[in-house]
Image (tube, rainbow, N blue to C red):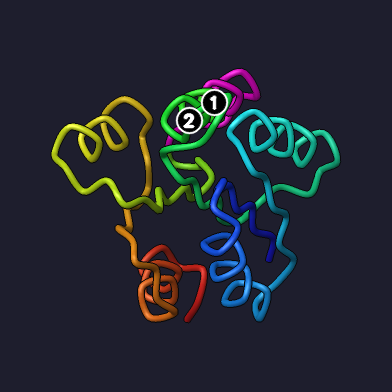
Amino acid sequence: MRFLIADDNRFSMELIKSVLEEYGECVCAEDGVIAVEEFKKSLKDGNPFDLICLDIRMPRMDGQEALCKIREIERKDGASIEHDTVVTMITALDDEMHITEAFLKGNATGYITKPITREKLIDEMTLYGLLC
């Protein structure tokens, strides 16, 4: 499996990576701009990500905007909503406005609030069929 982790907090990024790298390759991005570029590159190379973890608060481009751009790229590439990449927002923001925006505007697959734990990540991967 391949994972894209976008978080400007180095500690959070390394924690997520330490869990996910047991299951596959991890690519890290410190902002939404890099995350979108890595996503485009993965499609161009024919090696797409199985799971993308996006923090919401990041410099240059936040996770909500990055998610919308990723979904836009998928639509242009001909992917249907049923074949969207699994994207989980991982953030300290647990208010209704941010959660609603992630699911309704960006079509997020999941939403995990910090603090991040191994159990939360494993549960999320299992829920979306990435682990049996």
* Residue 57 placement, left or right of 31: left
Amino acid on which the number 2 mark rests in the picture: Asp
Classify residue 79 by image quadrant.
top right
**Which circle marks residue 52 in the picture?**
none
Q: Main secondary structure of the magenta part?
A: helix
Question: Residue at the location (68% across, 66% down)?
Answer: 1
Residue wearing tag 1: 61
Percent position (x, y) of residue 103? 28, 37
Q: Is residue 63 left or right of residue 108?
A: right
Residue denoted by label 2:
62
Question: In the rendered image, which quarter is residue 119 located in?
Answer: bottom left
In the shown orientation, is residue 17 left or right of residue 102? right
Amino acid, disc 1: Met
Q: Which residues are magenta?
A: 72-81
The answer to whether residue 55 is left or right of residue 69 is left
Q: Which residue appears at 25% of the width and 35% of the height?
A: 98
Which residue in the rendered view is the most extreme toward the left? Answer: 96
Disc 2 is placed on an element classified as: loop
Task: Name above or below for residue 105 compared with residue 93.
Answer: above
Residue 76 forms part of the magenta stretch: yes
Number of other residues with Cα within 10 Å of mark 1, as a class: few under 14, some 14 to 19, many 20 or more: some
To which quarter of the image does residue 76 belong? top right
